[in-house]
Amino acid sequence: MERRPVRTVSDAEVFEHAHALRQAVAAHTRRSGGPLAVDWDAIAGHLKRPVVDVLLLAQALQLRKDSWAQVALPAPATLRYPDGWDAPTLGRLRDFVHAQFGHAQSVDWDIVALYMGVDSASCASAHVSSTLRSLGSVAAETAATQPVRSRSHPRKWTADEHARLDFATAHRTRFRTWDDVASFVGNGRTRSACISAWSFKRDRQVQKSAQWTRAELQKLESELLASGGATRLSSMRLAELFPNKSREQVRAQLRRTRVLLEYRKVRAAVAPDPQRLVDCCEAMVDPRTAQPDWHQVSAAMGISPAMCRKQYRALAVQASRRQPWSKHETQMLRDALDRVNKATPDRWEVVAQLVGSRTPAQCLQRTQYLDRRKSEQTSS
């Protein structure tokens, strides 16, 4: 049978127990703070009430604006699973959830967070992850030990991360923002990474059931070109053009077609004369940042500012690959190697950022060349 606190706290209970609860919290709170800083079980025994009723009362007092009703509670901690959770704390979390709520689908994570002294997203992440691991999933352990990689070397999503992402997106009333979803997924995943993974999975699921013919793709492309690249097309118009496709299928294919047209426009603008983009970036400089004014460059090239920035950086990398290493770059590389420890995750990405004008692969190759040269000179 489902067990969860469904009742609310009345104003009469708030007035009756506010003073006693404040005194009990002050007597059973560790000054050091941290997880389980407040002993709610002892407070419940002192007040002779169930622990969930005491937590609901404390939550009601925290929501009131009256000064007499404020309860001095320590700030909730943020713990990343599994490193921040020791076995006793994780056991208390799982025992409380099982005893009071029965299963994770019906958990009020705000009550759990108040009991544990840890924020709700961390509690939900630890509970679901530990449950998945106890059921035989070892993906959480392997993913947690992997370093967070840069954009140029993205880390693959594990089965456990996909499971937590599916759980969070299926319970959006509990995880209201993408920041909450990212905190629940954990393992260093950002909100943008969660949005991208969710969008990619949704598009794949939608496109599996959609069979687009070449004529339909050309018709959709023509409609998009006729609208001048409008961000929104008429739903009624799309329904008339593709009566055998659902709204989600048309939207997913519309996003892909926009990306395809954007890359076509980029190839037409940059490929014939790449030096034109370089000249525009060097001529149109924002005096405040000493960087190219991408909006002016976009107006001159006829492509989006983001694509201008991306193509300009790609051209700069290609140019650096064809140029030999200068003395200044070699010295910058040596200084970066002295500053960055060998045990640093994504060491070569950090070194490349410190050098500034070279890629991680180029920095690695140059370092290997310098080491070989040094060993040859030593042996001779």
Image: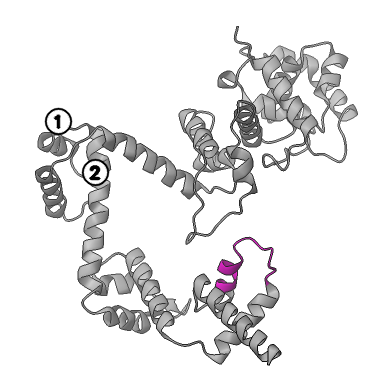
Residue 250 in the image: x percent, y percent?
22, 39
Disc ID at residue 244: 1
Q: Find the magenta span and give its range.
A: 340-353
The answer to which of marks 2 and 1 sits earlier in the sequence is 1
- Residue at point 48%, 48% (across, down): 193
- Residue at point 59%, 22% (across, down): 104
- In reply to whether residue 347 is colored magenta, the answer given is yes
Q: Nearer the viewer, residue 219 or 37?
A: 219
Residue 68 in the image: x percent, y percent?
78, 28
Q: Is residue 79 above or below residue 7?
A: below
Colour scheme = one colour
Q: Is residue 281 left or right of residue 372?
A: left
Q: Is residue 52 above or below residue 114?
A: above
Q: Is residue 294 above or below residue 47?
A: below
Q: Is residue 127 left or right of residue 355?
A: right
Query: CB under 8 Å between callouts 2 and 1?
Result: no
Q: CA distance from mark 2 to mark 1?
A: 14 Å
Residue 358 visible at all: yes
Badge 2: how crowded within 10 Å, few (<14), some, or many (20+)? some
Question: Residue most toward the front?
Answer: 380
Residue 27 in the image: x percent, y percent?
90, 27
Q: Give the quarter of the image for residue 105.
A: top right
Which residue was labeled with disc 2? 253
Disc ID at residue 35: none
- In reply to whether residue 307 is colored magenta, the answer given is no
Residue flagged by tag 1: what amino acid is it? Asn
- What secondary structure is marked by label 2? helix
- Residue at point 53%, 34% (across, down): 164
Q: Is residue 146 left or right of residue 246?
A: right
- What secondary structure is marked by label 1? loop
Q: Give the quarter of the image for residue 245.
A: top left
